[in-house]
Amino acid sequence: MPNDFNQQVIEEFRANAGEVGGYFEGARLILLTTTGARSGERRTTPLGYYPDGGGSVLVIASAGGSPKHPDWYHNLVAQPQVTVETGVFTYEAKAEVLTGAARDEAFARAVEADLGWAEYQAGTRRVIPVVALHEIAGDGPPNVNASSMGQAVKAIHDAFRRELALIRKEIGEAGATLGAQLRINCLTFCQGLHNHHTGEDLGMFPFLADQRPELSPALDRLREEHVQIAALTAELKQVIGTAQADPAHVREEVERLTAALEAHLTYEEEQLIPVLDAPAGPGDTP
């Protein structure tokens, strides 16, 4: 892929919190920054990815079926610590090249989700590598790519909206059974939503309740909605966990979750963003 094309995607990605058009429109996309194996320079590449649960994602070194591995793959083999940008979060990760059955199982899931990967493999004699990027836990809060607390809330919410829209699309295109990767996509989304709401319940909401007592009714409603949404995600996970999950049933549960979550996110943005982004008064805590 030409460098000028990559740079255009990178700039658009960073300017729009991970949302791009053109070739990558509607795809799961990250920016992967590696250290050059020979030059030592930092190199950033836009890549499609698949959720892998537990704070990890998978990327595939297909290079469009080229006979050679892509440069970014050689770089991370030489220096496994990499930087991942999701559009909302930036974090350090450790790259692990999957081997044996782990590689084959992950690649099979990718092929099940998109037959193009099988075409790439058929077009080259090399075994296309699959790489797991494991987030390295850091101290302090996550590194959110936003200039204010209000913008951070909106960016995180929009990321959930985009992922849920992708899942709904994938379920709509599913056949008689639910694919393994789609199951993981759903479970990863549910876990991410749980982590986000837990963080709000333990961090942002108590802070706001202390600083802005007039927000108490809104915060109480938001906490109640967290409980309701947790019940919906639990039902979705139960449906997905059955041996022969019916895509139609899964779709019904996802639509129920979508309706409740969209109403919740909209209400939270209406109530909290104006407060979070309001100019600080002389007695406010920075």
Image: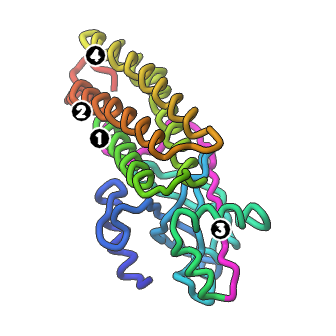
- Label 3 to label 2: alpha-carbon separation: 42 Å
Q: Magenta region: which residues?
A: 125-148
Q: Residues within 10 Å of mark 2 (few under 14, many from 20)?
A: few
- Label 1 to label 4: alpha-carbon separation: 19 Å
Kindly indicate the quadrant of the structure image that contains residue 117. Answer: bottom right
Mark nearer the viewer, 1 or 3 = 3
Q: Nearer the viewer, residue 125 or 138?
A: 125
Q: Nearer the viewer, residue 248 or 256?
A: 248
Are the residues flagged by discs 1 and 2 in contact, CB closer than 8 Å?
yes
Residue 247 in view (yes/no): yes
Mark nearer the viewer, 2 or 4 = 4
Badge 2 amino acid: Asp
Are the residues flagged by discs 3 and 4 in contact, CB closer than 8 Å?
no
Q: Is residue 126 left or right of residue 239?
A: right
Mark closest to the chain's N terminus, 1 or 2: 1
Circle number at residue 41: none
Q: Position of residue 190 (x, y in %)?
A: 50, 37
Give the secondary structure at mark 1.
Answer: helix
* Residue carrying label 1: 151
How is the model colour-coded?
rainbow
Mark nearer the viewer, 1 or 4 = 4
Mark nearer the viewer, 1 or 2 = 1
* Residue carrying label 3: 130
Q: What residue is shown at x 49% (from left), y 42% (from top)?
A: 189
Q: Quadrant of the C terminus?
A: top left
* Residue carrying label 4: 218
Give the secondary structure at mark 2.
Answer: loop
Mark nearer the viewer, 3 or 2 = 3
The answer to whether 151 is drawn above or below residue 36 in the figure is above
Badge 4 amino acid: Ala
Task: Name the magenta segment's main secondary structure.
Answer: loop
